[in-house]
């Protein structure tokens, strides 16, 4: 009986030390709606995401300056539509980092394209 308790405590210790206690963030992804005419107040932007690069409308930008770039694009537009294109080498974590930054910007409609 004593050896069984020792084994249980060793397993408990092992599982407690091997598990991670980090918080996982969630990113809400919605399906595309039906096609149709776009509103005149909508501005379109193209974001190309690479493993170590980020290009917006053909120009290299930094992830930390992303919200500033979107505030300068069309300050009078009601909504901004953003198409995010992924390259083959993009990881899920890199995509999540970019989507978290984009979710913090008001008036953005985000669509993620496949690689």
Image (tube, rainbow, N blue to C red):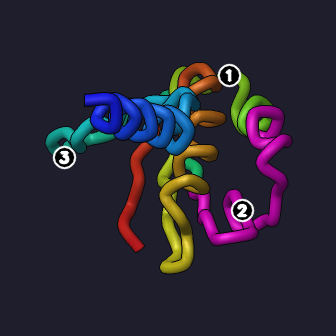
In this rendered view, identify the residue nearer to me: 99 or 74. Answer: 99
In this rendered view, identify the residue nearer to me: 33 or 77. Answer: 33
Mark 1 to mark 2 CA distance (whole Å): 25 Å
Whether residue 111 is situated above or below residue 41 in the rendered picture: below
Q: Give the class, few, some or many, for how many residues have Cα within 10 Å of label 1's Cα (few <14, many ≥20).
A: few
Q: Secondary structure at mark 2?
A: strand
Residue 73, horizontal then vertical, whole percent: 74, 39
Residue 2, horizontal then vertical, whole percent: 33, 29
Residue at image point 68% right, 22% down: 76
Occupied quadrant, residue 4: top left
Residue 56, disc: none
Q: Which residue is mark 1?
A: 76
Q: Which residues are magenta?
A: 46-69
Q: Secondary structure at mark 3?
A: loop
Mark 1 vs 2, N-terminal side: 2
Residue at image point 25% right, 29% down: 1
């Amino acid at each position: 009986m004593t050896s069984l308790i020792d084994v249980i405590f060793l397993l408990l210790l092992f599982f407690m030390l091997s598990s991670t206690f980090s918080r996982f963030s969630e990113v809400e992804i919605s399906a595309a709606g039906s096609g149709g005419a776009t509103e005149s107040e909508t501005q379109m932007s193209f974001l190309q995401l690479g493993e170590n690069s980020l290009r917006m409308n053909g120009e290299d930008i930094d992830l930390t300056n992303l919200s500033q770039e979107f505030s300068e694009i069309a300050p009078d537009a009601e909504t901004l539509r953003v198409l995010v294109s992924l390259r083959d080498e993009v990881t899920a974590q890199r995509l999540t980092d970019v989507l978290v930054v984009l979710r913090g910007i008001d008036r953005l409609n985000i669509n993620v394209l496949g690689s």
